[in-house]
Image: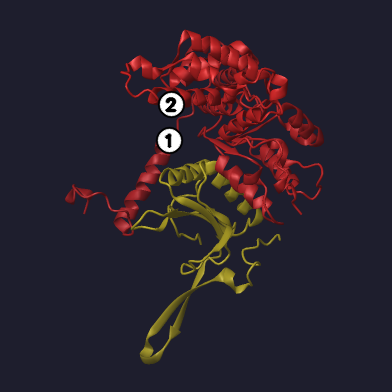
Chain colours: A yellow, B red
Amino acid sequence: MRVTQGTFSFLPDFTDDEIKLQLEYALQNKWALAVEFTDDPHPRNSYWDMWDLPMFDIGDASAAFMEVKKCREAYPNHYVKVTAYDPSPNRATTAFDLIVNRPAEEPGFQLERTEVHDRKMNYTVRSYAADKPHGERYQTNGK
Amino acid sequence: MSDDDTPDETPKRGFGLRNAGGSSEKAGGDADEKKTEEEPLLSDDDTVDVGQEEASVHTHEVLDRLEKELVGLEPVKARIREIGDLLLVDRLRRKFGIESTRPSLHMSFTGSPGTGKTTVALRMAELLHRLGYLRKGHLVAVTRDDLVGQYIGHTAPKTKEVMKRAMGGVLFIDEAYYLYRQENERDYGQETIEILLQMMEAERENVVVILAGYKDRMDTFFQSNPGMGSRIAHHIHFPDYSLDELVAIGDLMMAEQQYELSPDAQVAFREYLERRMVQPRFANARSVRNALERARLRQASRIVSDPSRKLTKSDLMRIEAEDILQSRVFTDDSPEDAVSAADAGDEAVADDAGANGQPPPARSEDAKAP
């Protein structure tokens, strides 16, 4: 099951050139870019690991894309996203989140039902991949 | 629902879904707009017009400005024109679908202080931007301090940070030979050189590195770092200016600041330059600038010293011979003695003070990296 979170995640995956255009758009708006990665893409997991430092004063999208490439190389089977931070007053928050890399196989999430008092149901989602310890998730069978 | 409801308000920056959606749409639209249609390749029989192509990228504007703003420097201008021509021909070749690898554009500028290395680098960035080889065409000028860290593990991120800032434009490393210190093998400058080398190779599509410095020291630098020398395709030497060229530079500077030299002052200025050129620490155009700055000071005090005089516009613009002849370069008869004399030192100090980002040759304090 394809994980959809962040900007444009319902569209087909972007090509590298399209990603660069998005990064360029962020820079035009003076948003700071940062690259993050995780192997635990639970919808409520807001805190992904940071790749290198956030880039506050780069002039061109190629610099940010260079970091994207490096992060992909280091973590080919992780989710990698670029976040654009808008520092303008009254906003000061993430302007977009763009997933730029995803594992080859995405097993998806299980919906867990727990029956509690008075026959009420509590629901939660759990990633199949999260069964394995951190670092071993999303490995393809060949590895 | 739509923005029409509140036409007078500035559009809200979106936390909300509606506005956030709006801005994402814009992002998408922007992407579509920018994705240019692949131009169909020309067939073998088609012809292209060099002049038309040149006009479409406006390179001649940059070259003309280079010609107008910079006096002399013929070999440099010729070389830059060659590079411009090569890149233009490459553009034409691509129209026919002829594969040509992107030429290496890293350069080294060598020459005495004040010969216009930084100015040319600035024009180079603009030229490469017009030709489509650099997306932004900005110039990031750095020295050793900006690249080399202070403790273990500090250098690599620092260098990369600077490199990232320069991507899409030109990284101009002034006094590049300071990066390598022969006397200290554990100096962090070596690490900077390694990272620079690696990124010059890997990111040569995105950044052009220009190393600048004095000729002899840069030669030693390249000798001790052969990898660096071989990765730089264009070694451009900036010759010292001749007397006539220096006079022309002075005229240009005066015209820029709306001053003029009286005929006597022109003669005096020429003589001043003749004397100043043989003195030590002569910094070409920079010394000319400083001399003229001091002439302006003297002109001002001359005018102020006679309050009763009625002044015309040209009085305020003109620099007289006496403003120049008061210079200490003239008071000392033998230029050889001026070397040790305090007044020559004074001139030299003034030069250094005006030398923006050009430290005096001896900079041993920070040589003591662990």
Query: Which of the two labelled residues, at mark 2 and mark 1, occupies the earlier sequence position?
Result: 1
* Quadrant, the C terminus of chain B: bottom right
* Quadrant, the N terminus of chain B: bottom left
Q: For the residue labelled by badge 2, is the local secondary structure a helix, a strand or a loop?
A: helix
User: Where does residue B289 sit, x and y in percent of width and height?
Assistant: 54, 24
Q: Residue A82 carries which label?
A: none
User: Where does residue B255 sit, x and y in percent of width and height?
Assistant: 44, 17
B39 versus A74 height, above or below: above
Label 1 sits on residue? B34
Question: Given the image, on which type of amino acid does mark 2 rest?
Answer: Ser
The answer to which quarter of the image holds residue B286 is top right
- The answer to which of B287 and B368 lies nearer the viewer is B287
Q: Mark 1 lies on which chain?
A: B
**Callout 2 environment at 10 Å: few (<14), some (14 to 19), or many (20+)?**
few
Left or right of A16 in this view: A74: right
- The answer to which of B199 and B273 lies nearer the viewer is B273
Identified at 66% across, 67% down, the residue is A136
- The answer to which of B264 and A14 lies nearer the viewer is B264
Query: From this viewpoint, is residue B237 visible?
Result: yes
Query: From this viewpoint, is residue B64 visible?
Result: no
Identified at 43% across, 44% down, the residue is A25
**Callout 1 environment at 10 Å: few (<14), some (14 to 19), or many (20+)?**
few
Q: Mark 2 lies on which chain?
A: B
Identified at 50% across, 16% down, the residue is B322
B272 versus B179 height, above or below: above
Q: Residue B301 carries which label?
A: 2
User: Where does residue B65 sit, x and y in percent of width and height?
Assistant: 49, 18
B369 versus B323 height, above or below: below
The answer to which quarter of the image holds residue A103 is bottom right
